[in-house]
Amino acid sequence: MKIIDLYIIKKYLGTFGFMLGLLTIIVLVIDVQAKAPRIESNGFTVTEFLVNFYPYWIINLIITFMSILVFISVIFFTSKIANNTEIVAVISSGASFHRFARPYLMTSSFIAVIALLINHFVLPLANIKKNELEPYTYSAVNREQFTGSAEVSTQLSKTEYIFIKSYNKKEKRGSGFIYQKFDKNRKLIYQLNANEFSWEKTKNHFLLNNYLEKTINKDETEKLSNGNSMTKSFGHPPEELFPDVLLGQNKTTPELIKFINREKEKGNANLNSYLNELYQRTSMPISVIILTILGLSLSSQKKRGGLGLNLAIGIALAFVFVFSFEVLKVVSENKTLTPLFAMWLPNLVFGPVALFLYFKRANQ
C-alpha cells in the first residue's frame, strides 16, 4: 500500500499545484487588465504594482480559494482513478476504504497545517504590503474611504473619548480635535480642544495646534488655558486609535488577540469584524480536511455522468461553502450571530455531511 499511498499523494499534490497555478495566472491577468486604468490614473505604473502589490495579493488569493481548489482537485483526480477502476482494484486486493483514504487525510492535514501557519503569521505580513496600495485600485468613491478625510471618533477607556471633525488616515492629520474625560458618574471633568493636529511618528506623539484646555473642578468652577502648540500621547499610534476594517488583516494572531483584548477593556463593543478575522484563520484551514473527505466520498465511485458530473457537483458545493463565509461575516457584523459560531458554521454543517457520506461509501 505504500506505493499506492505515494501514488495518491503525488496525484493530490500535483493536481492541487496545477489548479493553483492555473487559477493564479488566469485571475492575475484578468485583475491586472481590469485595474490598470485606475492604477495609472493614480500616478503608478502597472510594473510597480506587479512588484510591490500583486505578489502579496496572490498570497491572499490562494488562502481565500484554497478550500475550493482542494475540493475540486480531489474530485478531479479521484474521479479519474475511479473511472479507470483503480479504486476497485485496490479495494479488491483486500485493503479497506479507510486504508485507501489514509493518504488523502495525510495530505489534506499537511496542507491544513501549512494554511494555518500562513493564516496566523505570514498572511498578515503580506496584507500590510497589499493594503498599502490596494485603495489605489478602487473606484474614486471607495478609495476616498481610505485616503480621504472623514469624521472619526474613538473610545480610549470607559471614561475617555476622542472626537475629530476631519481626519486624513493617509497623512495622519486632521482638524476639529476634541478629547474628553469623565468621572465615574459620567460627569465631564476635562476637555481638550485643538484646531489642528498631526501625528509625529519619530516622537510617537500627537502635535496639537491652537489648543484650549478646560478643567472642571469639584465645586463646578472651571480652569481654562490655551496655547499655540502642545504634545499629547494617548498610548497608541493613530492606526490603532482610529482602526479601520483592514487593521485586523494586518496583525498576526498574537497581535490581533492583544488588540481585541485591549479594545474590550476600553469598552469597545464593535469588535465582530476583528473576531471574524481571528476565527476564520483557523476554520478555513480545517475546512481543507472536511472538503477532502467530502470530495473523496462523492467521487470515489464510478458514475454514469463521469468526471463532468462530479466536477459540476464539486464546483457548486465548493463555492457555496466558501462564499457562505462572506455571507456569515455580514450576518455576524450585524450581530445576528456570534463571530465564533458564524465562522465555524460552514464546518459544523459540512463536517457531519462529509462524515455521513464517507462512512456510507466505506460500508458499500
Image (cartoon, helix red, strand yellow):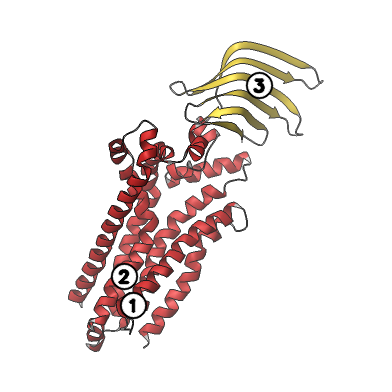
Density class for disc 3 (Cα within 10 Å; few <14, some 14-19, many ≥20) is some
Report how far apart the C-alphas of labels 1 and 3 lie in the structure: 67 Å
Density class for disc 1 (Cα within 10 Å; few <14, some 14-19, many ≥20) is many
| Mark 1 / mark 2, whichever is N-terminal | 2
Residue for badge 2? 74
Tell which of 179 and 58 is nearer to you.
58
Residue 139: x and y in percent read 46, 40
Residue for badge 1? 299
Q: Residue at x 28, y 78 (%)?
A: 100
Which quadrant is the C terminus positioned in? bottom left
- Residue 62 shows up from this direction: yes
Tell which of 101 and 353 is nearer to you.
353
Which quadrant is the N terminus positioned in? bottom left
Determine which quarter of the picture holds residue 291: bottom left
| Mark 1 / mark 3, whichever is N-terminal | 3
Q: Residue at x 54, y 60 (%)?
A: 342
Report how far apart the C-alphas of labels 2 and 3 lie in the structure: 62 Å
Whether label 1 touches label 2, CB < 8 Å: yes
